[in-house]
Amino acid sequence: LMPPRSVLAIFVGGKSTRMGTDKGLLVMPRGAETILEALVQRGREAGLDPVLVGEARPYAHLVPDVSRIDDDPPGAGPLAGLHAARRHTMRANATSMIAVACDMPYVSVDALVAVRDHPSERAVLAPRRTVDAPWEPMLARYDAARLIDLVDAAISRGQRSFQALFAELEVEPMPLSPTIERALRDWDTPGDLPPVS
């Protein structure tokens, strides 16, 4: 029996003002490929269908065979990316999607498989670093069909935040293994980058 298909939604729409360059173009630690190329490759190795969500023009030449979808509606923040990715997932006849950001170089195949396969009946499966920490919307798994009305309503109210959306949902905590904890590390500012050897 084939497992249900899942989408890997790679969010590329951030402004990158603090980093000063498109973060997905940063080169992987000890590698020659960009974070974006590594995420696409690892997603495919984990059996996921990658799609770029948001302003993807800076990346089109790197992964020309990967679908690109715009935020929906444009300019409405991260939930607009979630909304677009959810619609894409439904159209692709996939059941769920895993969201990652293009500044997460430590997302491994093992981390993606763990999130994909963790048993949960809830609309969202998401890690959080401690019990009272905010949920991590990236490296979270979303049940596309169960988000339809909630995400539409949140956007129409002008909501932009994942945390506000999660407060209205039943979210299952993803166990924080070392693999997941490492995968959550992102590169936000030049100070986050590893020293050049």
Image: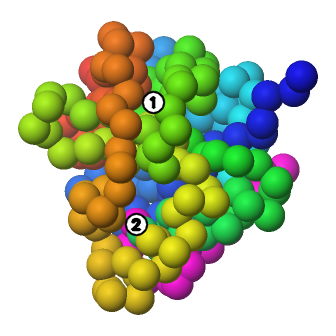
- Residue closest to the eye, 119 or 53: 119
Q: Earlier in the sequence, mark 2 or mark 1?
A: 2
The disc placed on residue 78 is 2
Instruction: Say whether residue 105 is left or right of residue 94.
Output: left
Residue that extends furthest to the left in the rendered view of this protein: 132
Which picture quadrant has residue 183?
Answer: top left
Instruction: Tell whether position 69 is magenta.
Output: yes
Residue that extends furthest to the front in the rendered view of this protein: 121
| Magenta residues (range) | 65-78
Residue behind mark 1:
105
Which quadrant is home to the C terminus?
Answer: top left
Instruction: Tell whether position 155 is magenta.
Output: no
Q: Secondary structure at mark 1?
A: loop
Viewer-nearest of labels 2 and 1?
A: 2
Percent position (x, y) of residue 155? Answer: 41, 81
Instruction: Say whether residue 108 is left or right of residue 170.
Output: right
